[in-house]
Image: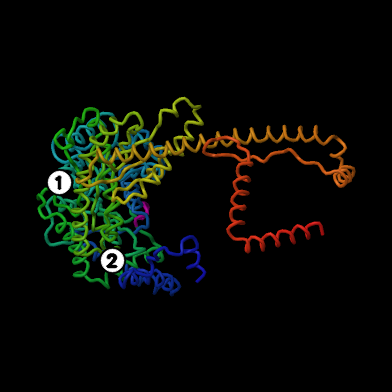
Amino acid sequence: HFVHNLIHEEDEMEDNRLQNVGEQGHMALLGHSLAAYISVLDKEQLRKLTTRILSDTTLWLCRLFRYENGSAYLHEDNRDGLVKVCRLIINARYEEYASEGYSVFRSKQPVIYQSASCRPGLGQHLCSQLGLPLSSLCTVPCNTIFGSQHQMDVALLDKLIKEDLEAEKLPLLLIANAGTPGAGHTDKLGRMKDLCDQYNMWFHVEGVNLATLALSDVTSAVMAATRSDSVTLTPGQWLGLPAVTAVTLYRYEDPALSLAAGLTSSQPVEKLRALPLWLSLQYLGHNGIVQKIKDATSLCMRFVLHVEDELNSPVVLFKFSQEMTAASSGGSVEGYCAGEKEVLDSFNRWLGEQLVQLVPTSGVEVVEFEDEGTYIRFSPLLTAAALGTQQQDIEHMVKRLMELVPVMSSTVSLRQDFREETHRHAASLRYVEKLSWPGLGAVRYQPQEAEGLHESRRKQELEKLNAELLKKLQDLDSDIMFSSGPEFETEDDCIFIGMVTEDVDVSELVETIATLGKEIEESGRLLENMTEVVRKGIMEAELQLQRANEEKLMEEGMLRQLPLVGSVLNWFSPVQSSIKGTTFNLAAGSLDSTEVIYSTKAQASRLSLQDTPTSSSKRLQGMIIHCCCAPL
């Protein structure tokens, strides 16, 4: 209960995923508690049991993923297996490494080759863990003319290896992808394996597409991964198993070097890492494992009905795209197409965020590519098992896409019209260029009177006026979203217009914004004028009060102003004050005498006294009694 409170102390409404891991997830979590219990057994019993568990797990994984005669290393960090493999290769290629250490690299510097589409930071992590300089890392560019833009350029790789050999370096390892982290593309594994055999290099493969090796129908591009020297698998992600380790399968015959590299251990407790995965594989069975992977790949086929054979992958990338021409926008787009890529990227980010909110079980995510821009990625092998994605979720996502895409298309088409209409109201409206805003655009109401003010004063006035204008626009009965912009936006005096449908009249919308802004400006000017009038009236009233006090002093004299003497004089010789009452007229902005008001009331009272003598006499009696009682 205490740990539960620690988890939810910040947000009580947060979803507790541990309560919904499913029966197979509980089996994996049970393995961790069982491993702790088994670790206290007798040493001989522990050795036999852990050896059986690890050997069974290794055998099942090798058969399941078609990796014959392989050994398994289980690790928490999915990069740790590759680090241990690199240590194995270094021990094998440098005979004196065990005794001489890093000094053996002086004669021949090792080189590790990786793709430009590899996992970010993987090569740097290898160098830091192995104590190698970053110059030992060679990043091979991807194809730009022929083939996929996410596949390693094999011809260039061959050239780089030859150059390193001529420089008396040692090509050590090649890291290939069977499903790149971003696009899910598979390298040309067959040709890369031939190069590794030619130059005596270790060939390592990783990627989400390795999961399809468990299926009966496997593409030849992925099947070539079975020829590699090592592969890294992540069955926990593919099967939706929480707290299950990653696995690196490798082929090497010398157990001593494997032990020196850390791929095997003589400690039985270390072998207990396999227990959660062992239990999960037992529970799911071969058919259950294959069915889960098949269901995930079928979700992609459901989403994309026609896929080319060479691009057959359990990863789907899609994006919104629209030709921005004069015909589509209804006007000239000169100066606008320069930012077309950034505009489309912002729209695709918005689309991805909407799909995540509307269909959270879809597992889609927004990915960024340096050259191709923003895409939305659907990779059910990494998300479907954990989120429980079903066929109806895919249908729901497609339905939402059919609703969102027309709105995005109409908004992109009307952006230039909105810009031109805003320029027609240049006297009061300013178009604000915000290519990163996924909507119709941004404007600022800027009256001419504000131009002559001081910079700080002008900024305050603009923020105040545009904030009031935004509030009035939000109160309109309209489906258009008006906002102050994204959270990271630094400008506070802009009004951002969101997505619009094709039936929106842009000219009428801009006219409405300009009209409302003008009304707010005029009402503010009226208030300022009234404030000035009131201020002058108060100053005039103060002057009149000062003159009245001076006149009173002249009429009554100084003695009557003394508290005790003045009361005695007023008792014996009352004076009639000449001070007149005044009233402030807001409409005219002037001070008037109150004599007119009192004379009018007096006439009205005399008329009412003649009309109703009885009631008036009663009121008069009451007044007389009141006056008599007043001195008391």
Identify the residue at horizontal 76%, vertical 40% (top origin): 577
Between 624 and 416, the one lying in front of the other is: 624
* Disc number placed over residue 57 in the picture, else none: 2
- Say if residue 252 shows up in the picture: no
- Tell me which colouring the rendered structure shows: rainbow
- Where residue 546 sits: x, y (%)? 72, 33
Q: Is residue 303 above or below residue 473?
A: below
Between 275 and 116, the one lying in front of the other is: 116
* Disc number placed over residue 190 in the picture, else none: 1
Between 448 and 139, the one lying in front of the other is: 448
Residue type marked 1: Gly
Labels 2 and 1: the sequence-earlier one: 2
Q: Report the residue that reaches farthest toward the top.
A: 452
Circle 1 packing at 10 Å, graded few (<14), some (14-19), many (20+), is some
SS of the residue under disc 1:
helix
- Where residue 442 sits: x, y (%)? 33, 38
Between 126 and 260, the one lying in front of the other is: 126
Q: What stretch is highlighted in magenta?
A: 259-263
Residue type marked 2: Thr
